[in-house]
Image (cartoon, rainbow, N blue to C red):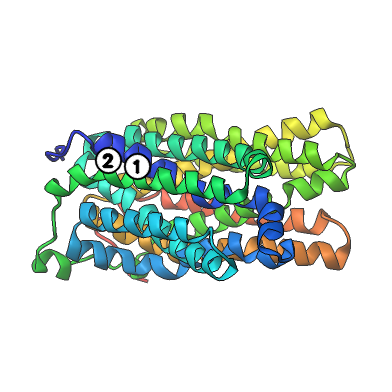
Amino acid sequence: MKNRKHSTFLILGIFLLGACMRTPITSIPSMLNSIADGIGVKSTSLGILTTLPLICFGLISPFVPKISAKLGNEVTIALTMILLTAGSYLRIFNISSLFIGTLLVGVALTFINVLLPALITDNLPTKIGTMTSLYILSMATFSSIGAGISSPLAQAINWQFVVIILTLLALITLVLWLPNIRFNKRETPTEQGTAPNPWTNKTAWLLLLYFGLSSFVFYTLIAWLPTIAINAGISANTASLLAGLFQLASIPPSFVIPVLAEKMTNRKPIVFGAGAATIIGLLGLMLPIHSVTYFVVLNIILGLATSATFSLLMTLFGLKTKTSQETSSLSGMAQSLGYLIAAVGPVLTGSLQSVTHSWGTSLLVMILITILFSLAGIWSEKRKFVFNSEKKF
């Protein structure tokens, strides 16, 4: 496959889209108290703000490939950025607009999640690893910065100011993406009619399980790692810093893993290594050690491991498909049920903790799920391409 002619703004656009992939939602949790105080509600009533986008990811992902096939990837992303900018800005007014805006943000990010791998496959098929590394690195870096500075800025100025900054990021991305529209490519009716069906493909299902179950573990750690640290006797402020460290640790794998995966013909060692490291980190959380240094090490291990898994998955969507149509179809399928599975994680593990009054059972469940998603990832490597001489169930 050869790289298609594209705008000189394409690579910058991919980088900025990566910056927008998580920052509009990961910047919110750390300033929930400021938001609640500002609009006069209890902070507990705003918990849905972190789960709404995940629900959108799950419910809307299957429809993204069909829409992009009719409009073209470049135009679809431009419209998505308009929606993201409007939704983000809408959040600053009152509680109703906050929820509506968050819903629109979730819809917009769903399109970015699904289409970025397809966009790379379509335009830069010889640079899948490098380009995937670029946008995941951007996503991890901007998410860490957003999560780290949102609370101090909200306290120093106000939370609306932080949301306006996030809106400006989306607006800048939109403006710099516009030159790419000139190279928009729509699929012909014939191409649309021959879209591969991933729902009857065994390898696609393995990748869905790999994505969904690993996301279950990741979002559970995002939700409960600070609480686990606090229960171990660590202060709330230190636990917050540890959560930031977990995010920062995700940056190195996001840079290395996609490039490495592209060069390897068998990625089982990456799957196994990331899964094993995740299990080591989870086992470490079960030990009665309350040292801050110990929790620093565990957060680094878990941050590196979960990022390695996610980075590999986003690269595999492109490496295991031959066309952008196949990539978006596979990506949409995996992220649909995958994110719905992920949304169950924090609720299930939190409920288990409430019933048992201990994190031990929840951590055991996460270890079991890590074993399962690692096996799914290893089995998915038996076939080079998902849709190559596919076998039906």
Q: How crowded is the residue under tag 2: few (<14 C-alpha within 10 Å), some, or many (20+)?
A: some
Question: CA separation, marks 2 and 1?
Answer: 6 Å
Q: Quadrant of residue 288?
A: top right
Task: State the residue in front, 152 or 377.
Answer: 152
Find residue 134 and name its label.
none
* Residue 253 at x, y percent in the picture: 51, 32
Q: Residue at x 34, y 30 (%)?
A: 263
Callout 1 secondary element: helix
* Residue 352 at x, y percent in the picture: 79, 65
Task: State the residue in front, 365 or 242.
Answer: 242
Q: Is residue 210 above or below residue 125?
A: below
Q: Report which residue position mark 2 lands on.
A: 176
Q: Which amino acid type is marked by label 2?
A: Leu
Q: Residue at x 69, y 52 (%)?
A: 34
Q: Quadrant of the N terminus?
A: top left
Callout 2 secondary element: helix
Q: Which amino acid type is marked by label 1?
A: Ile
Q: Quadrant of residue 148?
A: top right
Q: Quadrant of residue 255?
A: top left
Q: Is residue 264 visible?
A: yes
Q: Is residue 255 above or below residue 34?
A: above
In the image, 339: left or right of 355?
Answer: left
In the image, 57: left or right of 162?
Answer: left
* Residue 59 at x, y percent in the picture: 45, 70
Q: Quadrant of the C terminus?
A: bottom left
* Residue 23 at x, y percent in the picture: 50, 46
Q: Residue at x 86, y 32 (%)?
A: 291
Residues at circles 2 and 1 in contact by the CB criterion of under 8 Å? yes
Task: State the residue in front, 291 or 322.
Answer: 291
Q: Report which residue position mark 1 lands on.
A: 172
